[in-house]
Image (spheres, helix red, strand yellow):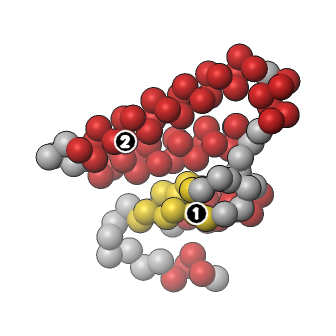
Amino acid sequence: MAKFKAEKPDDFQELIKVISDVSSEMIELIQESNLDKYAILDYVSMNQQYLQELGVSSPEIDDIVAICMENEVHAKLTGAGGGGCVLCLPKQPDSDLTALFK
Protein backbone atom coordinates (compact mmCIF):
# COMPACT_ATOMS: atom_id res chain seq x y z
CA MET A 1 0.00 0.00 0.00
CA ALA A 2 2.84 2.40 0.80
CA LYS A 3 4.29 1.85 -2.67
CA PHE A 4 0.92 2.53 -4.32
CA LYS A 5 0.48 5.67 -2.21
CA ALA A 6 3.96 6.93 -3.14
CA GLU A 7 3.67 6.14 -6.86
CA LYS A 8 0.07 7.25 -7.38
CA PRO A 9 -0.94 9.65 -4.60
CA ASP A 10 -4.02 10.97 -6.41
CA ASP A 11 -5.30 7.47 -7.19
CA PHE A 12 -4.57 6.45 -3.60
CA GLN A 13 -6.59 9.35 -2.19
CA GLU A 14 -9.47 8.60 -4.55
CA LEU A 15 -9.54 4.93 -3.52
CA ILE A 16 -9.49 5.86 0.16
CA LYS A 17 -12.44 8.22 -0.43
CA VAL A 18 -14.39 5.56 -2.35
CA ILE A 19 -13.73 2.95 0.37
CA SER A 20 -14.90 5.44 2.99
CA ASP A 21 -18.04 6.21 0.97
CA VAL A 22 -18.84 2.50 0.55
CA SER A 23 -18.36 1.95 4.28
CA SER A 24 -20.65 4.88 5.08
CA GLU A 25 -23.32 3.53 2.72
CA MET A 26 -23.09 0.13 4.41
CA ILE A 27 -23.54 1.72 7.84
CA GLU A 28 -26.60 3.63 6.63
CA LEU A 29 -28.12 0.46 5.16
CA ILE A 30 -27.55 -1.46 8.38
CA GLN A 31 -29.20 1.30 10.40
CA GLU A 32 -32.33 1.34 8.20
CA SER A 33 -35.34 -0.47 9.57
CA ASN A 34 -36.01 -1.97 6.12
CA LEU A 35 -32.64 -3.67 5.69
CA ASP A 36 -31.69 -4.51 2.08
CA LYS A 37 -29.38 -7.50 2.55
CA TYR A 38 -28.61 -7.75 -1.16
CA ALA A 39 -27.36 -4.17 -1.27
CA ILE A 40 -25.12 -4.86 1.70
CA LEU A 41 -23.72 -7.95 -0.02
CA ASP A 42 -22.98 -5.86 -3.11
CA TYR A 43 -21.17 -3.28 -0.96
CA VAL A 44 -19.12 -6.05 0.68
CA SER A 45 -17.97 -7.20 -2.76
CA MET A 46 -17.28 -3.66 -3.95
CA ASN A 47 -15.26 -2.94 -0.83
CA GLN A 48 -13.12 -6.03 -1.41
CA GLN A 49 -12.48 -4.98 -5.00
CA TYR A 50 -11.27 -1.56 -3.84
CA LEU A 51 -9.09 -3.12 -1.12
CA GLN A 52 -7.49 -5.33 -3.79
CA GLU A 53 -6.80 -2.26 -5.93
CA LEU A 54 -5.31 -0.55 -2.89
CA GLY A 55 -2.90 -3.44 -2.49
CA VAL A 56 -3.90 -4.66 0.98
CA SER A 57 -5.22 -8.02 -0.17
CA SER A 58 -3.10 -11.09 -0.88
CA PRO A 59 -3.20 -13.90 -3.45
CA GLU A 60 -4.54 -16.25 -0.77
CA ILE A 61 -7.36 -13.89 0.15
CA ASP A 62 -8.11 -13.28 -3.53
CA ASP A 63 -8.42 -17.06 -4.02
CA ILE A 64 -10.76 -17.40 -1.03
CA VAL A 65 -12.90 -14.51 -2.29
CA ALA A 66 -13.07 -16.04 -5.79
CA ILE A 67 -14.15 -19.43 -4.41
CA CYS A 68 -16.76 -17.73 -2.24
CA MET A 69 -18.17 -15.74 -5.14
CA GLU A 70 -18.42 -18.91 -7.25
CA ASN A 71 -20.69 -20.27 -4.49
CA GLU A 72 -22.84 -17.13 -4.05
CA VAL A 73 -20.99 -16.08 -0.93
CA HIS A 74 -19.83 -12.46 -0.77
CA ALA A 75 -16.49 -11.98 0.94
CA LYS A 76 -13.94 -9.35 1.89
CA LEU A 77 -10.81 -9.16 3.93
CA THR A 78 -11.01 -7.73 7.39
CA GLY A 79 -8.34 -6.47 9.71
CA ALA A 80 -5.16 -4.82 8.50
CA GLY A 81 -4.98 -6.83 5.26
CA GLY A 82 -2.19 -8.95 3.95
CA GLY A 83 -3.62 -12.30 5.01
CA GLY A 84 -5.43 -11.79 8.28
CA CYS A 85 -9.07 -12.81 8.01
CA VAL A 86 -11.89 -13.01 5.46
CA LEU A 87 -15.50 -12.17 6.27
CA CYS A 88 -17.85 -14.43 4.25
CA LEU A 89 -21.58 -13.73 3.92
CA PRO A 90 -23.75 -16.20 1.99
CA LYS A 91 -26.45 -14.82 -0.28
CA GLN A 92 -28.89 -17.34 1.21
CA PRO A 93 -28.63 -18.03 4.95
CA ASP A 94 -29.41 -21.73 4.51
CA SER A 95 -26.80 -22.25 1.77
CA ASP A 96 -24.78 -25.46 1.69
CA LEU A 97 -21.26 -24.13 2.14
CA THR A 98 -19.42 -27.45 2.06
CA ALA A 99 -17.99 -26.61 -1.38
CA LEU A 100 -15.99 -23.82 0.23
CA PHE A 101 -13.97 -26.30 2.27
CA LYS A 102 -12.81 -28.61 -0.52
Specify the quadrant of the image occupied by residue 52.
Answer: top right
Residue that badge 1 annotates: 86
Residue at 40% across, 51% down: 41
Which residue bears the numbered disc 2?
Answer: 26
Q: How packed is label 2: few (under 14 Cα within 10 Å), some, or many (20 or more)?
A: some
Left or right for 83, reference 2: left
Q: Secondary structure at mark 1?
A: strand
Q: Residue furthest left?
A: 33
Residue 11 as seen in the image, left or right of residue 32: right
Circle 1: is it few (<14), some (14-19), or many (20+) Cα within 10 Å? some
The residues bearing labels 1 and 2 have C-alpha atoms spaced at a distance of: 17 Å
Q: Is residue 51 visible?
A: yes
Q: Is residue 85 above or below residue 28?
A: below
Residue at image position (62%, 28%) is 15
Q: In percent of the image, x 52 and y 41: which residue is there?
A: 46
Residue 69 location in percent, x, y?
Answer: 54, 59
Which of the pair 86/79 is nearer the observer?
Answer: 79
Question: x and y percent of residue 60 in the render?
Answer: 74, 63
